[in-house]
Amino acid sequence: MVAGVIESARPRVVVLSGLFAAVCCVGFAVVNVAFESSGRFADGPLADYAAGLTVMNWLVVLLKLLGAAVAVYSLTANPKHVEVLGVLLWGAFSLLALYALGSVAEAAAILSGLTGNRDAITLASVAYVAFFTFLAVAFGILAVAHTRRFGLGPRCILLGALGAPLVLAVLLVGVPALLVGLGLMPSF
């Protein structure tokens, strides 16, 4: 069914990048759903924050599913709203790239002795950062391919690359503040 939706003339690296990105986004959304179904935050030191963490967790699920939809939709033959799709692709790329770069910078600070403990850098943590770097590259491939395919200008690139981190920052500050105001989370 997916093969019928995906444009057959797309380069293989673009199609594989889109499918990889979509599967990763859905997989990470499943992790958040598992957190909710297991009651992970209902007990322990975060119990006071359980209602607020539930709201944030479901918001994260929606964002991850949006990422999967954007990745798959970018592979279709004639997507509508190509500029909006371009902004979303560049936004996903920039968020993931910033996350990966931030993680590498943190590892460099730990290794140089500026902060943290060198034992915190494990094979699992390196694999985690490498995985997010590959995911960023996949969205970067999709963003560049979409931009070239539809001749999008720098406006879409800048709106996505600069706008997405700003929107995420507002969400990560604004939503918890709203939850505190609604009494779903204690004040910090």
Image: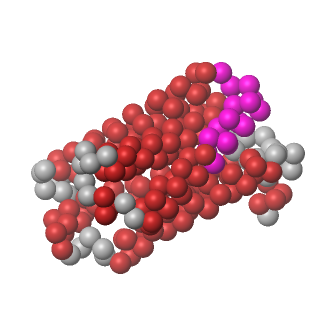
Q: Identify the residue at the far left of this view.
A: 187
| Viewer-proximal residue among 66 and 19 | 19
Look at 18% across and 74% down and name the residue there: 44
Is 141 drawn above or below residue 180 in the view shown? above
Look at 57% across and 60% down and name the residue there: 24
Q: Identify the residue at the far bottom of this view.
A: 38
Where's residue 35, x and y in %?
Answer: 37, 71
Where's residue 170, x and y in %?
Answer: 33, 38
Give the mark count: 0
| Viewer-proximal residue among 137 and 143 | 137
Q: Does 140 sit left or right of 52 as displayed?
A: right
Q: Identify the residue at the far right of this view.
A: 9
Where's residue 174, x and y in %?
Answer: 28, 41
Determine the image quadrant of residue 105. top left
Look at 62% across and 54% down and name the residue there: 21
Quadrant of the frame with the N terminus: bottom right
Is 133 drawn above or below residue 118 in the view shown? above
Determine the image quadrant of residue 168. top left
The colour style of the image is secondary structure
Q: Does 98 sit left or right of 144 as displayed?
A: left
Magenta residues, as a range?
A: 138-153
Q: Main secondary structure of the magenta part?
A: helix
Q: Is 119 part of what is drawn in magenta?
A: no
Look at 68% across and 51% down and name the residue there: 18
